[in-house]
Image (tube, grey):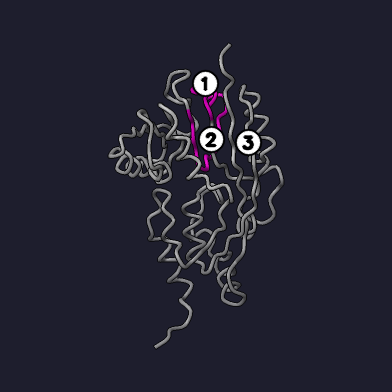
Amino acid sequence: MTTGPRAFEDLVAEAVAAPTDGWDFSWFEGRATEERPSWGYARSMGDRLARVSASLDIQTGGGEVLASAPRLPPLAVATEGWPPNVAKATALLHPRGAVVVAAPQDAPLPFADGAFDLVTSRHPVTAHWAEIARVLRPGGTYFAQHVGPRSVYELVEHLLGPQEEAASSARHPDRERAGAEDAGLEIVDLRAARLRMEFFDIGAVVHFLRKVIWMVPGFTAEAYLPQLRSLHERIEAEGPFVAHSTRHLFEARKPAAG
């Protein structure tokens, strides 16, 4: 027996009830897809972690990306500011010997100057360059994958209407390059990618916006029901909603002393 398309209300209710802690995206299986950057951030991060003695992962989320590394250095530290993610990262990373520190994302890093050989981050909300440079030892490296400008803006603008270019300019790789250089870091590598995303049902859209909270700040399904319903009808009539994420790979080095 076949069944017809699921009702809008059912899809939204299911997505609202789904947990959003951590950076596990398995809930989207069969419901959304996202093209991956060619550079393979997690693999490259793992290669670098295996070669250092002290590392810091900033805004680690639930610790999933750091935990994917085959080998962690003798001193591996991660920070996270959202309590549910702190708990999840602690459970995942402590058995690997990594320490998770609860630290607000906008506060100074609670570590001594020059404490780490390698600082990593996957999709930090903001890169605080002066603090990153401060905690790196001379010759140390910052290696990260950032969210780029106007990422998934097809979806953002469906809900919020047209956005000023300035709303996303802070994430532009050229501006971030300038910020890193102003903090005294030397750019080793900077690559950008624009990647296709597809949302197959409105539940995937709702779950994405609840999980990636900076896309539409303060998002709730209830507050955006008219926009969500119109998007649901569009998906039902035309097929998957297509958007594009933007990412850039950042590698910067703190100059060696002397």
SS category of the residue bearing label 1: helix
Residue reaching furthest to the right: 165
| Residue range of the region highlighted in magenta in the rendering | 118-141
Task: Assess whether mark 3 and mark 2 are in contact (beta carbons under 8 angstroms).
Answer: no
Mark 2 → mark 3, Cα distance in angstroms: 9 Å
Task: Assess whether mark 1 and mark 3 are in contact (beta carbons under 8 angstroms).
Answer: no
Asked if residue 129 lies in the magenta stretch, the reply is: yes
The residue wearing badge 2 is 143
Q: In this picture, is 188 found above or below 184?
A: below
Q: Say which amino acid is labelled 1.
A: Arg
Q: Which mark is residue 189?
A: 3
**Closer-to-camera residue (238/89):** 89
The residue wearing badge 1 is 134
SS category of the residue bearing label 3: strand
x, y (%) of residue 52? 44, 29
Asked if residue 215 lies in the magenta stretch, the reply is: no
x, y (%) of residue 4? 47, 83
Q: Say which amino acid is labelled 3.
A: Asp
- Residue at 59% x, 51% y is 38
Mark 1 → mark 2, Cα distance in angstroms: 15 Å
Tell me which label, 2 or 3, sits earlier in the chain.
2
x, y (%) of residue 57? 44, 35
- Residue at 57% x, 64% y is 198
Tell me which label, 1 or 2, sits earlier in the chain.
1
Q: In this picture, is 234 found above or below 39?
A: below
Tell me which label, 3 or 1, sits earlier in the chain.
1
Q: Quadrant of residue 139?
A: top right
- Residue at 50% x, 50% y is 212
Q: In this picture, is 214 found above or below 78?
A: below
Q: Say which amino acid is labelled 2.
A: Phe
